[in-house]
């Protein structure tokens, strides 16, 4: 039963007319990357989970786009996903959410929980924990069948959660209020830069290995409060320097395009009504990011990447000045 239905896609894609029910990325992403038929991959953290993969497929005329995502994913986890997909499939497009914080995490670590190791490895002899599992039989398989039969279930929204998450200024400020957060001394812009360079080098090398694959990179649209918190945590200058290094390095590849998707646009990042917390935007924000891909006005190039970083800095500094001078009441008024 477990082998036939295989809810974690360890052995094969869904059988018959079952939909691709994906709810637990820790257990399912590796199987999806190995066993599904696709020519596009969306990689990133929870910030991109609610992007509709089918919208990307339609926009870029892909046969299918699958999601390879993980909450707060380090760059090394996305590199692991890249290896799984590019080494097993002929991939036309990689859509990569460039979370600046991901480059500041330790390289050479898949970031996958230890409890899923027996599922994601290629050793069939330790699969007993999956094959002979009452929870899989009694819970996961029935849920897979039930969800597949639900006409409202959209596989393109796999792992998405923003369609059920309320948004609003009060909700965001309850999560993070800049006036209640002390500012610690600013770290040097070279903070953790050895890790940053190694993570970006690994991504750059992978891009060079697959010149026929188009890498569409983008900087997810966080709220201004996320950048404010980075400033008060002493990380702001280091993050700006990381963006500068990433842009200047990766843009040298002919098969790379990078889009701002309004990550530095004050109109989007200061409207807290469209966020659930400082980093997760509403479905309107995720749709905007998808629509902005390919928009030449949003394209970051070797000629303009510094201006894009300066635009972000101006928006963040102006916001912080208002908070310090006026408090936060203006957020509710607007």
Image: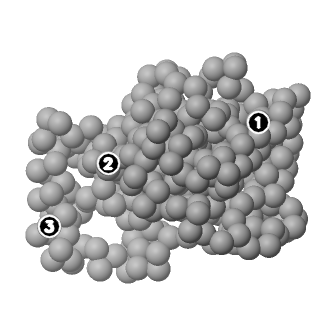
Q: How far from the left and from the top, in percent, is residue 54? A: 39, 31
Q: Which residue is mark 2?
A: 166
Which label's residue is closer to the chain start, 3 or 2? 3
Front position in the image: 66 or 296:
296
Q: Which residue is mark 1?
A: 311
> Is the residue marked by circle 3 packed among few (<14), some (14-19), or many (20+) residues within 10 Å?
few
> Is the residue marked by circle 1 packed among few (<14), some (14-19), or many (20+) residues within 10 Å?
some
Real-space Cα separation, disc 1 to disc 3, in angstroms:
49 Å
Figure quadrant of residue 50? top left
Circle 1 sits in a helix, a strand or a loop, which is it?
A: helix
The mark lying in front, picked from 1 and 3, is: 1
- 71 lies above or below 136: above
**Numbered badge on residue 139:** 3
**Numbered badge on residue 22:** none
Circle 2 sits in a helix, a strand or a loop, which is it?
A: loop
Determine contact: label 3, label 2, CB under 8 Å. no
Residue at 18% x, 54% y is: 144
Q: Is residue 270 left or right of residue 203?
A: left
- 113 lies above or below 252: below
Quarter in which the N terminus is drawn:
bottom left
Real-space Cα separation, disc 3 to disc 2, in angstroms:
28 Å
Task: Identify the image's colour scheme: rainbow, by chain, secondary structure or one colour.
Answer: one colour
Figure quadrant of residue 29? bottom left
Real-space Cα separation, disc 2 to disc 1, in angstroms:
29 Å
């Amino acid at each position: 039963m477990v082998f036939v239905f295989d809810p974690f896609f360890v052995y094969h894609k869904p059988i018959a007319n079952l939909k691709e029910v994906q709810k637990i990325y820790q257990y399912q992403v590796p199987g999806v990357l190995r066993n599904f038929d696709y020519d596009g991959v969306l990689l990133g953290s929870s910030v991109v989970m609610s992007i509709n993969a089918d919208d990307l497929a339609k926009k870029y005329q892909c046969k299918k786009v699958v999601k390879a995502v993980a909450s707060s994913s380090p760059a090394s986890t996305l590199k692991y996903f890249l290896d799984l997909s590019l080494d097993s499939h002929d991939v036309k497009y990689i859509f990569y959410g460039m979370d600046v914080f991901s480059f500041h995490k330790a390289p050479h670590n898949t970031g996958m929980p230890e409890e899923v190791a027996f599922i994601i490895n290629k050793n069939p002899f330790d699969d007993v924990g999956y094959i002979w599992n009452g929870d899989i039989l009694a819970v996961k398989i029935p849920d897979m069948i039930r969800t597949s039969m639900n006409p409202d279930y959209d596989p393109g929204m796999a792992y998405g959660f923003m369609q059920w998450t309320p948004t609003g200024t009060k909700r965001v400020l309850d999560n993070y209020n800049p006036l209640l957060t002390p500012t610690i001394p600013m770290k040097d812009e070279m903070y953790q830069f050895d890790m940053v360079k190694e993570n970006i080098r690994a991504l750059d090398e992978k891009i060079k290995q697959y010149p026929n694959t188009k890498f569409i990179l983008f900087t997810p649209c966080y709220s201004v409060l996320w950048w404010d918190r980075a400033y008060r945590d002493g990380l702001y200058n280091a993050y700006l320097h990381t963006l500068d290094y990433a842009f200047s390095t990766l843009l040298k590849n002919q098969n790379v395009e990078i889009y701002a998707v309004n990550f530095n646009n004050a109109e989007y990042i200061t409207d807290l009504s469209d966020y659930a917390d400082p980093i997760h935007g509403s479905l309107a924000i995720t749709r905007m990011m998808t629509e902005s891909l390919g928009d030449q006005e949003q394209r970051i190039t070797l000629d303009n990447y510094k201006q894009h970083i300066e635009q972000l800095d101006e928006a963040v500094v102006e916001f912080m000045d208002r908070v310090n001078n006026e408090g936060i009441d203006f957020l509710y008024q607007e």
